[in-house]
Image (tube, rainbow, N blue to C red):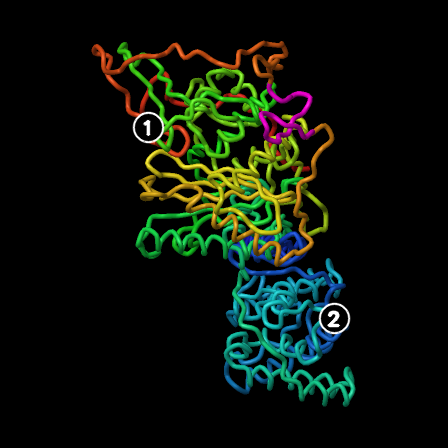
Amino acid sequence: MFNSLVKGSIILAMLFGVALTAAFIYAYEEISLDADKLINYKPETSSIIYDRNGEKLAYVFKDQHRLYANYDEIPGMLVEGLVAMEDTQFFEHNGVNPDAILRAIVKDIQAGAFVEGGSTLTQQLIKNKILSNEKKLARKIKEAILALKIEHELSKEDIIERYLNEISYGNNYFGVKTAANGYFHKELHELTLKEAAILVGLPNAPSFYNPLKHYKRALDRANNVLYRMKSIGWITKSDYLKAVKESPKVYKTSLTQNIAPGIVDEVLRRFKGRLGDIRTGGYEIYTTIDMKQQAIAKEAVDFAYKKALKKYNEKAETSTLNTAFVAVESKTGDILAMVGGADYEKSAYNRVTQSKRQPGSAFKPFIYQTALDMGYNPASPLTDLARTFQYYYQGKPKIWAPKNYEHDFKGFIPFREALVHSRNLATINLVADLGVSTIRKRLAFLDVPHIPRDMSIALGNLGLSPLKMAQIFSVFANEGHMIEPRLVSKIISKEGAVIYETRPKEIEDFTTPEQAYLMTDVLMDVVKRGTGRNARVDGIELAGKTGTTNDNIDAWFCGYSPTIEAIVWFGRDDNSRIGRGATGGALAAPAFAFYYKKLLELYPETKRTFDIPQGVYRGEYQGKPELYTQNSPLPDSHKRRVQNYDGYDQLLEEEIEIKEDLNPDEGEIGLAPMINIDEDPVSQEEMVEEEDPLHPKRKVPLTPVSNDSGTLF
């Protein structure tokens, strides 16, 4: 009997020991996992977006707005104030302060409840990062064990660094650097002693001592911090008296400080999924935006938009009319300003990058540049006569009979005048002479998507975003060299490494500088005396082209100065008609002019005249002065030699016989809907839905012409 009891007791003792050991191992492993959250500390850190001049555009974050500060960034007075108030023996204990615990136990017994914890800074950090605030014995024991382990793994400086970055300072500011930046608009090294004392006093009760809501309380609390520092000899009496008298200015700042929401949205959209969650990675993102130019671009849009609303007697609150503006530095492709809509609060949709609209006659310069590069001259006569085309749709013959916006004919018109006054029939006949395949080959080099395979190429019958128009228009603004617009120049990680740099997509020698200048000279005339007269600005040479689509659905002005190109678009978000007289010259050109007027005021040193490349000559044709180059000589009275894009010479007769003289009134042929090419090309709806040889449905190319821009490494 006795032996049985002894054996039973031994077995129970063994089982208890095994259970206790297992519990200890489990607790230790759990504690190790918890401790790892501080040992390998990786908090959510806000990313900062800058403009090209280093001005902060926004802080972006997910749940906690935190700017991380390394220990070396933290002023000594902040560390001293913190230690003085919270844990004077911090640099002497090993994570747990027995004296403080004994004092707390005595006070708790006297009060009959947990009223004081006796926690060290290390324990406070653990409580904030790992454990709850609940005052239970089990939690306090675990907290003490964790403190011992963390003090064994980390230096005192590491613990201070983690504490000052983890703690909340109210107003959703996490970390002392965030609080300094938010409350005082200062970096840590710029803080005064009083400002540092305010920050030291905040974590004890962030809401109660919030300087935005309870300024006097915050000052009183800061004075207590200063008194404590003086009493233990960590600041002098004179420093104390000076700091006590100070009443720092406190700023009520938006958490994100987002002064360019459309730009920030575009950055986040472009890098979504490419760098993890960009809102928590602590990146420094440098954009190409110039906030001064962004401001005048917004003014320009507001000016033109209000003018348009007045023209059509509409109110901004209910109008479907919208607009977009983008300005790009010609040589670099840097996007200097981008306004994605009339009112970001009403609609955050970025029409510069996300919408695709028909450019109409704003697309004509690419056709005319092709002609110049094939040997045409700005003085070359073009046929401005009616021309009809027969085609078949669903087995039935159809007639396409384009017309001029002015409903008249000039017979023959110089190349220059045809583009200056945007003559539709001259353009149609030019496309017929050049050949659609020739133009398509040229445009393919520019990454133009969905290029029509038929005569509708003359209509600007394709969908392009304003940003894409800026990209392809750079061949004129940048002397024949296309460069893709870029928004982000570089991204720096929180460790200080450059992890992203933009390599813009470039296409060299789409045409030569002298051939591109011929187009610039013609487009300057568009602004001086053509459809773009409303884009004129005194004191600077400007070149550009208007564009208006069928039924006045889209209105464009695409132009450039010697250094900067700007694209302006107006239209309704529902693709409905804007209204009578809604041309690119009437709606878009005024915003273009406003921007350049303000640009000259902002940067008086802006280059104002275009450079004339070598190889451009001045001559005379039929009594009028005209430019010419070796490749685009002044026209002969009978024939001209043309260097075809495919590389072979071809003799073209000056007068082209029009053989497609079909009479739509005869027989049962039927008349297709009238299509006006320049100021009235086909609508987007017609382009997409009607399947016929003139307007086939477009397919996205399977293989891009060139690689994506930018590189991650």
Q: Which residue is mark 1?
A: 686
Front in this rendered view, residue 228 or 547: 547
**Residue 619 appears in view:** yes
Residue 39 in the magenta stretch? The answer is no
Residue at figure coordinates x 30%, y 25% from the top left: 674
Separation of marks 1 and 2 at Cα, in angstroms: 67 Å
Q: Which residue is mark 2?
A: 75
Query: Which quadrant of the view contains residue 612?
Result: top right
Residue at figure coordinates x 50%, y 31% from the top left: 417
Judge left or right: residue 569 versus residue 154: left
- Write the start and end of the magenta stretch as one range: 617-635
Residue at figure coordinates x 52%, y 22% from the top left: 381
Q: Which mark lies nearer to you, 1 or 2?
A: 1
Query: Which quadrant of the view contains residue 410?
Result: top left
In the picture, the quarter occupied by the C terminus is: top right
Front in this rendered view, residue 407 or 516: 407
Judge left or right: residue 494 versus residue 390: right
